[in-house]
C-alpha cells in the first residue's frame, strides 16, 4: 500500500497546469454508451475513478482504448445492462449508468452505488426523474429498472442534485419528445455534459434561469471532446498556495468557475484572481474566516470544504464552516486534531481556532477531499507527515505529489 511523505514548512511558488475535470468526465463517459460511432475524450484525467468507470464500460461490452490522456470508446458492442456489485461499490458515479442504460437498452440493473463515505446521498431524486420519463423500478440491494419506452416530460427536481440532473439528461436524450428539467443543477460539469452531447448532434440547451430543455430521440454520432480543467483540483492547489504564503498560478484554469473560492480567499486577506487566462493566489498572512457555508453552484463547493478547513488551521482567530450538502464531511477533523489543530464540531458546523503551528504526524485519508486537506495541513506542519490510505486521493488527483513538487513542496509517494 502506498503512502505520502511530506516535510512541511516550504512556501509553494510556481505555475502548473491541472488535469481534466473528474466530475465532468464521469457522466461524459457514461454518455458514450448512447448513440453510434466512436467517442474520443481528450485531456481525460488518469485517476482511479476514471479507471473504475472504464472497467464498467468494458464489462458492458464497449470497446475502450486508452493512450495517455486520450480515451477512445466505441459502444456498438455494448449489450449487457447489468453492472456487477464488485464494479459498482468502488465508485459513486456508477449510478449515472442508470439513465444511459435505460436510454440505450430499456433495462438496467445497478447495485446501490459506493464511493466515499461522506453521507447518505440518496438516489430518490434520480428515480423520480427517470420515472417521469417512463421508467419503472424494483429496489432491494440493487436497482432494477425497465421501460416500455422513454418519453419526454417536465421534471422539477426537489433540489438541484448534480447526479439526478445528469441521469435525467442522459435518459432524456433517448426519450421521444421534449424534456424540460427545472431546478436543474447549475454546476459547470453539467454544462460540459451538455456541450459533449451537443457535439454529438444532440439538441440540448440551458436557459437563462438554469432550466435544461432537451429535444430527445435524435441520433447521436461520434465526437471528439476535450475536457476542461478540474476546478476542484485547481481550488485545492490555490488553497495550498494561500496556506503556505506562496504564489501559485494555474495556467489552464481562467477561474470563471472559482468565483466563490476567490470571494472566500479575499475575506481571508489573500490576493487572488485571474491574469492572462490563468487563476492565481499571492499568499501572505491568512486571516480567520468568520463564516462560510457550502452550497450548490455557484455557492462555495462542498468538495473544497475540507481543503479550506486545513488552510484555516493556522490563522489568528476563529473561523466557522457550515456544511449543508453532506453530513459526514467533517471526518477529516479527527486527523487534523492529531496534527495539533483546534477544531470543534457541533452538528453541521465546525469552528476552527487558529494555532501557531501544526506538527507532523501519521494520519489517514478518510475520503477523497479529506485526503487533499491533510496534504495542505502537512505542507504547513513542522516536521514530517505520513498520509496513509492514499487510494482515496488517487481517485480524484492524478498525481498530487508530482504537481506539488513542481511548486516546491517536499513531498513524495512511497
Image (cartoon, grey):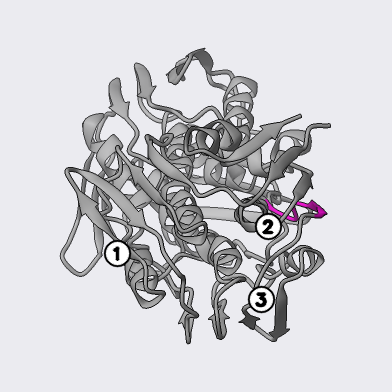
Which residue occupies 36% across, 67% down? Answer: 270
Q: Nearer the viewer, residue 45 or 187?
A: 45
Residue 134 visible in rendering: no
Magenta residues, start to end = 361-367
Q: Which mark is residue 355?
A: 3
Q: Kindly state the secondary structure of the residue where label 2 is placed.
A: loop
Residue 309 position within the rendered picture, expressed as x and y whole percent measured from the top left: 58, 69
Is 67 placed above or below 340 here? above
Badge 1: few (under 14), some or many (20 or more) residues near its Cα, within 10 Å?
Answer: some
Which residue occupies 47% across, 49% down? Answer: 237
Badge 2: few (under 14), some or many (20 or more) residues near its Cα, within 10 Å?
Answer: many
Q: Is residue 249 magenta?
A: no
| Gap in angstroms between the C-alphas marked 2 and 1 | 28 Å
| Quadrant of residue 36 within the rendered picture | top left
For disc 2, the marked residue is: 381
Circles 2 and 3 in contact, beta carbons < 8 Å: no
| Gap in angstroms between the C-alphas marked 3 and 1 | 28 Å
Q: Nearer the viewer, mark 3 or mark 1?
A: 3
For disc 1, the marked residue is: 259
Which residue occupies 67% across, 51% down? Answer: 371
Q: Is residue 51 left or right of residue 204?
A: right
Residue 378 position within the rendered picture, expressed as x and y whole percent measured from the top left: 67, 53
Residue 337 position within the rendered picture, expressed as x and y whole percent measured from the top left: 78, 70
Q: Kindly state the secondary structure of the residue where label 3 is placed.
A: loop
Is 409 placed above or below 119 here? above
Amino acid at each position: 500500500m502506498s503512502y505520502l511523505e511530506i516535510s512541511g514548512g516550504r512556501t509553494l511558488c510556481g505555475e502548473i497546469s491541472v488535469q481534466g475535470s473528474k466530475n465532468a468526465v464521469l457522466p461524459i463517459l457514461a454518455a458514450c454508451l448512447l448513440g453510434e460511432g466512436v467517442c474520443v475524450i481528450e485531456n481525460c484525467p488518469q485517476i482511479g475513478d476514471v479507471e473504475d468507470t472504464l472497467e464498467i464500460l468494458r464489462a458492458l461490452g464497449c470497446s475502450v482504448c486508452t493512450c495517455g490522456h486520450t480515451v477512445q470508446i466505441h459502444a456498438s458492442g455494448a449489450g449487457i445492462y447489468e453492472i456487477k456489485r464488485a464494479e459498482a461499490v468502488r465508485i459513486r458515479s456508477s449510478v449515472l449508468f442508470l439513465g444511459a442504460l435505460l436510454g440505450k437498452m430499456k433495462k438496467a440493473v445497478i447495485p446501490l452505488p459506493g464511493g466515499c463515505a461522506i453521507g447518505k446521498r440518496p438516489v430518490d431524486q434520480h428515480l423520480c426523474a427517470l420515472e417521469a420519463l417512463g421508467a419503472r423500478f424494483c429496489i432491494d440491494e440493487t436497482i432494477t429498472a425497465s421501460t416500455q419506452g422513454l418519453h419526454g416530460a417536465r421534471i422539477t427536481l426537489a433540489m438541484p442534485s448534480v447526479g439526478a440532473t445528469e441521469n435525467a439528461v442522459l435518459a432524456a436524450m433517448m426519450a421521444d419528445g421534449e424534456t424540460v428539467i427545472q431546478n436543474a443543477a447549475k454546476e459547470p460539469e453539467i454544462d460540459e455534459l451538455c456541450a459533449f452531447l451537443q457535439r454529438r448532434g444532440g439538441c440540448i440547451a440551458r436557459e437563462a434561469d438554469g432550466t435544461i430543455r432537451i429535444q430527445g430521440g435524435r441520433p447521436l454520432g461520434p465526437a471528439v471532446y476535450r475536457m476542461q480543467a478540474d476546478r476542484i483540483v485547481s481550488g485545492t492547489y490555490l488553497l495550498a498556495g494561500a496556506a503556505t504564503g506562496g504564489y501559485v498560478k494555474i495556467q489552464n484554469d481562467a477561474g470563471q468557475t472559482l468565483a466563490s473560492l476567490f470571494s472566500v480567499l479575499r475575506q481571508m486577506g489573500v490576493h487572488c484572481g485571474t491574469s492572462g487566462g490563468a487563476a492565481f493566489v499571492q499568499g501572505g498572512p491568512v486571516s480567520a474566516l468568520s463564516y462560510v457555508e457550502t452550497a450548490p453552484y455557484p455557492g462555495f463547493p462542498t468538495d473544497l470544504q475540507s481543503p479550506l478547513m486545513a488552510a484555516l488551521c493556522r490563522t489568528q482567530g476563529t473561523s466557522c464552516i457550515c456544511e449543508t450538502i453532506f453530513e459526514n464531511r467533517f471526518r477529516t477533523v479527527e486527523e487534523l486534531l492529531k496534527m495539533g489543530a483546534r477544531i470543534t464540531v457541533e452538528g453541521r458546523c465546525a469552528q476552527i481556532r487558529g494555532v501557531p503551528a501544526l506538527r507532523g504526524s501519521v494520519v489517514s485519508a478518510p475520503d477523497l477531499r479529506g485526503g487533499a486537506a491533510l496534504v495542505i495541513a502537512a505542507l504547513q506542519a513542522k516536521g514530517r507527515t505520513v498520509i496513509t490510505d492514499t487510494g482515496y486521493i488517487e481517485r480524484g488527483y492524478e498525481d498530487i505529489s508530482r504537481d506539488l513538487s513542481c511548486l516546491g513542496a517536499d513531498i513524495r509517494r512511497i
